[in-house]
Amino acid sequence: MQERTFPGTLDALEPIRTFVSEVAEAAGLERSAIYNLCLAVDEIATNVVLHGYEEAGLSGEMSVSAAVEPENLVIRLLDHGRPYDPNFHDAPTGDDLSRPLEEREIGGLGILLALDGVDNLQYEVTDRGNEHRFVVQLKQPSR
């Protein structure tokens, strides 16, 4: 397992994307899957910084780890900000997205991108902090 720690600031987003992209490429993901995974991690990390740390008046770090399992690549994002489970957020629906911008509710699009960008997005509060797990299935070799 590889793990890196980054400051809980917006300046950390680019190095996080680079780390996730390098790990995903080494795991054999296709370019589109790498892009979607990076986008998902970026959206959640942005929310951690803006809502989990800054809005809550907190500061801290984000640890990002990567593990290649037999069938999956798992990226873990760990933080100590205000807890927030993206799976219980009302993401925009198709009807919401078809309305003109001025009629849409603000927020939620990043969560939709994160949920759609990976095969499974898990969240839990652990003794180590808030943990988001981004799971992407690896292609199985043809037999």
Image (cartoon, grey):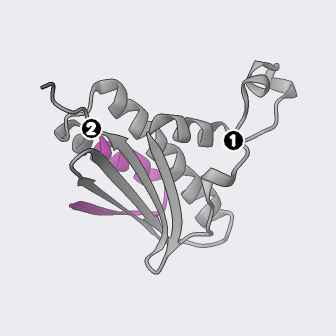
Observer-nearest of 58 and 106: 106
User: Could you say which quadrant of the image residue 76 lies in?
Assistant: bottom left
Give the percent coordinates (x, y) of residue 101.
79, 23
Horizontally, is 135 left or right of 110 in the view? left
Q: Residue at x 43, y 65 (%)?
A: 78
Q: Nearer the N terminus, badge 1 or badge 2? A: 1
Residue type, mark 2 in image: Leu
Q: Residue at x 15, y 30 (%)?
A: 141
Spatial CA distance of label 1 from label 2 is 28 Å
Observer-nearest of 14 and 1: 1
Does residue 54 show up magenta in the picture? no
Give the percent coordinates (x, y) of residue 7.
42, 64
- In the orientation shown, which residue stands out farthest toward the bottom? 127
Residue range of the region highlighted in magenta in the rendering: 1-21
Whether residues under marks 1 and 2 lie with C-beta atoms below 8 angstroms apart, the answer is no
For the residue carrying disc 1, how many other residues have a C-alpha within 10 Å: few (<14), some (14-19), or many (20+)? some
Q: Determine which residue is flagged by label 2.
A: 138
**Which image quarter is the N terminus in?**
bottom left
Q: Determine which residue is flagged by label 1.
A: 108
Q: Nearer the viewer, mark 1 or mark 2?
A: 2
Residue 78 numbered mark, or none:
none
Residue 87's place in the image compared with 100, above or below, is below
Horizontally, is 71 left or right of 11 in the view? left
Does residue 3 show up magenta in the picture? yes
Secondary structure of residue under mark 2: loop
